[in-house]
Image (cartoon, helix red, strand yellow):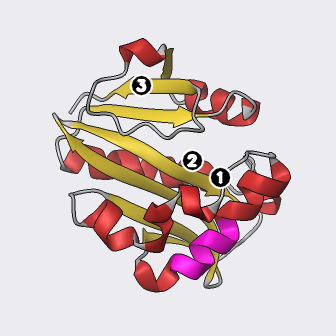
């Protein structure tokens, strides 16, 4: 295991540029997902879109540089939408465990907030992400099984659900 100075903490609007600089290249260049910043206005105002509604947005930083993100939108109904889970390519995998630590941070927050149902949408080409969610006990669900209050992103075409015991 590499010794790295990893911190995971909530991030805010003053981190928006760094968040966009991390996420957009992963979406557009690495995975050819046809999405732009205009299609994700939430990234321009993290505080209003995530934190003010009882959710949060976390960043994983190594030596102060953003290498991963995960976010949660509190949808009410003791449920949430997991969003914006990205880890820079060179920091993925078990060697660093960053994705796992980000997910554990989000699930700890959920339990503290009495959120029992975590939903997420992703795209079918992100096979490694599917394996990661399934390894963490998320179940694949049909779009018809999403609750009406789930804020669906247009690009998403594969959906998962995790029920937490509190």
Q: Which residue is mark 3?
A: 161
Q: Which residue is mark 2?
A: 100
Label 2 close to label 1 by CB (< 8 Å): yes
Looking at the rendered structure, the secondary structure element under dot 2 is: helix
The question of residue 103 being in magenta is answered with no
Disc nearer the start of the sequence (2/3) = 2
Q: Nearer the viewer, mark 2 or mark 3?
A: 3
Q: Judge whether residue 1 can be spotted in this image.
A: no
Q: CA distance from mark 2 to mark 1?
A: 5 Å
Residue at (27%, 26%) from the top-left corner?
148
| Front residue of this view, candidates 77 and 144 | 144
Q: CA distance from mark 2 to mark 3?
A: 17 Å
Q: Position of residue 61 (x, y in %)?
A: 59, 74
Looking at the rendered structure, the secondary structure element under dot 1 is: loop
Please identify the dominant SS of the magenta region.
helix
Does 17 sit above or below residue 136? below
| Front residue of this view, candidates 145 and 90 | 145
Q: Position of residue 166 (x, y in %)?
A: 20, 33
The question of residue 19 being in magenta is answered with yes
Residue at (63%, 54%) from the top-left corner?
86
Left or right of 93 in this view: 46 = left
| Marker disc for residue 97 | 1
Residue stretch in magenta: 16-22
Looking at the rendered structure, the secondary structure element under dot 3 is: strand
Does 14 sit above or below residue 121? below
């Amino acid at each position: 295991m590499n010794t790295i100075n990893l911190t995971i903490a909530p991030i805010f609007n003053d981190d928006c540029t760094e968040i966009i600089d991390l996420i957009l290249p992963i979406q557009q260049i690495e995975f050819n997902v046809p999405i732009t910043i205009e299609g994700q206005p939430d990234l321009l105002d993290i505080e209003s879109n995530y934190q003010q509604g009882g959710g949060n947005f976390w960043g994983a930083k190594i030596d102060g540089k953003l290498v991963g993100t995960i976010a949660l939108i509190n949808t009410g109904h003791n449920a949430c939408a997991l969003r914006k889970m990205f880890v820079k390519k060179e920091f993925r995998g078990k060697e660093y465990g960053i994705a796992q630590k980000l997910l554990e941070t989000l699930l700890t927050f959920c339990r503290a907030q009495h959120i029992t149902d975590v939903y997420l949408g992703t795209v079918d080409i992100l096979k490694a992400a599917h394996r990661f969610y399934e390894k963490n006990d998320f179940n694949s669900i049909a779009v018809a099984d999403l609750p009406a209050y789930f804020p669906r992103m247009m690009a998403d075409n594969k959906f998962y659900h995790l029920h937490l015991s509190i």
